[in-house]
Structure formats: structure tokens, C-alpha cells
Image (cartoon, helix red, strand yellow):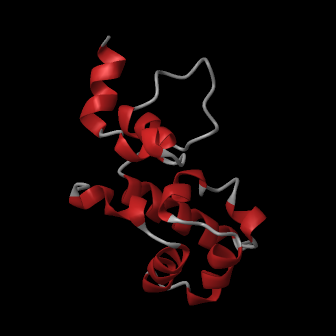
Amino acid sequence: MLAGNMAFLQWSCDDVAGWIESLGYPQYKACFTDNLITGRKLIYVNCIYLPRLGITDFKDIQAISAHVRELLGITETLWSHSIADPPRDNMGLFLEKKSRTGAQADNLTFQDFLDDTQE
């Protein structure tokens, strides 16, 4: 069973669309369902990716990206990390692994991930 703050990993496309609507952006529901964005794929949703989904209003892009980071419990902007930047946070790295499909990703817990990084 997932912790309460990880429940979004089980969201379907419709669940994600409902969440977007609950944030006050019902006009973007189809952008998420048409592009098959599930809870696992939210890790990829950021300011760079949203225009590819069809969201082009800059203020909306910023707001939705902030809501996604809040939901995921991360503070960093993913996928724009330079080697000169400090190391990434564990939650962001864990969610990248959980965004994949398959038994290994399904069974990975945050504690298992932390244990593996300590070795």
C-alpha cells in the first residue's frame, strides 16, 4: 500500500484530468487525457513539457508546474539539471524510477530506494 502522499502514482488519466480540473484548469483536461498522462507520468510534467501537451499560456504553465511539484513533494525543476548543480533530492530521483512501468517499479518503496542509494 502506498503512503498517502504517493497515492497519485496509481492515478489513471481520468484521475489526473480530474485533479487538473480541481486546480481550476478544466480547459486542460483533454490535454492530459489525450496524451495519456497518468499519475506515474506526472514526474515528466514541467514547464518544458506542458507546451507539448497543448498548454501554451505562460502563467498557466508556471502554476500547473508548481502544483505538480507540490503534489510530488519536490522543490526542484526536473530535467534541467546541470552537472554543476548540487546533487538532486532523493524524492525526485525516486519518482523518476517509479514513473516507469513493470514489477520492479511497482514494488520499489521509498525506503528500498534509500537503502539502495546508501550502499
Which residue lies most toward the top here? 119
Position of 73 with respect to 16 (left or right) is left
Q: Quadrant of the C terminus?
A: top left
Residue 115 x/y as whole percent = 27, 22
The residue furthest front is 103
Q: Residue furthest bottom?
A: 26
| Rendered location of residue 50, percent (x, y) | 68, 63
Q: Is residue 87 above or below residue 11?
A: above
Q: Is residue 50 visible?
A: yes
Tell me the residue at 54%/60% (across/down). Answer: 65
Side of 51 where 109 appears, left or right: left
- Provide residue 98's location: percent of width, then percent of height: 45, 45
Residue 76, visible in the rendered structure: no
The quadrant in which residue 1 appears is bottom left
Residue 5 placement, left or right of 74: left
Which residue shows up at 68% across the image and 68% down it?
58
Position of residue 24 relative to residue 86, above or below, is: below
